[in-house]
Image (spheres, rainbow, N blue to C red):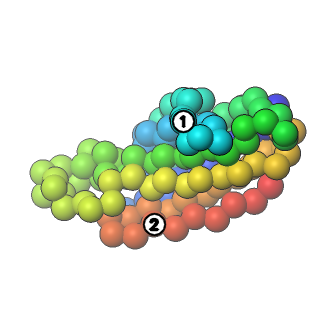
Amino acid sequence: MATISSHVLDAFHGCSASGIRVLCHRLSEDQKSEQVFEVKANEEGRIVEEIDFTSSGENTFELVFFSDEYFREKLGESYAGRQIVPEVVIRLVLPDPEIRYHVPVIIGPHSNTFWWSE
């Protein structure tokens, strides 16, 4: 089985984004989605989830990081209604069903960045 992992960092507060909700969907060739997992990051802002797929099968996934929800919880009413990019969505095409894919993400109220490694 492959593994998808992430370390989510909160650039605004300078800490790990503990508790951020992360959703993963598998996308079919006709763009239909099937939920694979939904988790909240641990106290270190990390997620680690195993996923099952074949290299010749449907190997396109979307990770959704609910950044607006996270910052509303952290910043309260002063933040409400100010976000025009409510989620960070990363589409992955995974070639190997037996390795770990690590996708760290840095989130802020007005910017996001990510990278990946195996």
State the separation of the CA atoms marked 1 and 2. 26 Å
- Residue 32: give its label: 1
Task: Kindly tell me whether residue 80 is visible in this rendering.
Answer: yes
* Coordinates of residue 50 in the picture (x, y in percent): 72, 32
The amino acid beneath tag 2 is: Asn
Task: Kindly tell me whether residue 46 is visible in this rendering.
Answer: no
* Coordinates of residue 8 in the picture (x, y in percent): 53, 53
Residue drawn at 34 percent across, 47 percent down: 70
Give 98 or 33, whichever is nearer the viewer: 33
Locate the N terminus and report the quarter of the image it occupies.
top right
* Coordinates of residue 93 in the picture (x, y in percent): 71, 51
Circle 1 Cα neighbour tier, 10 Å, few/some/many (<14 / 14–19 / ≥20): few
22 sits to left or right of 4:
left
89 sits to left or right of 75:
right
Give 62 or 70, whichever is nearer the viewer: 62
Nearer the observer, disc 1 or disc 2?
A: 1
Query: In the picture, residue 4 is in which quadrant?
Result: top right
Q: How many marks?
A: 2
Describe the element under mark 1 as helix, strand or loop: loop
Residue drawn at 55 percent across, 55 percent down: 90
Residue drawn at 33 percent across, 54 percent down: 86
Locate the C terminus and report the quarter of the image it occupies.
bottom right
- Residue 113: give its label: none
103 sits to left or right of 95:
left
* Coordinates of residue 84 in the picture (x, y in percent): 27, 62
Please name the residue that numbered disc 2 is placed on. 112
The amino acid beneath tag 1 is: Lys
Describe the element under mark 2 as helix, strand or loop: strand
Residue 1 lies, with reference to residue 93, above or below; the image says: above
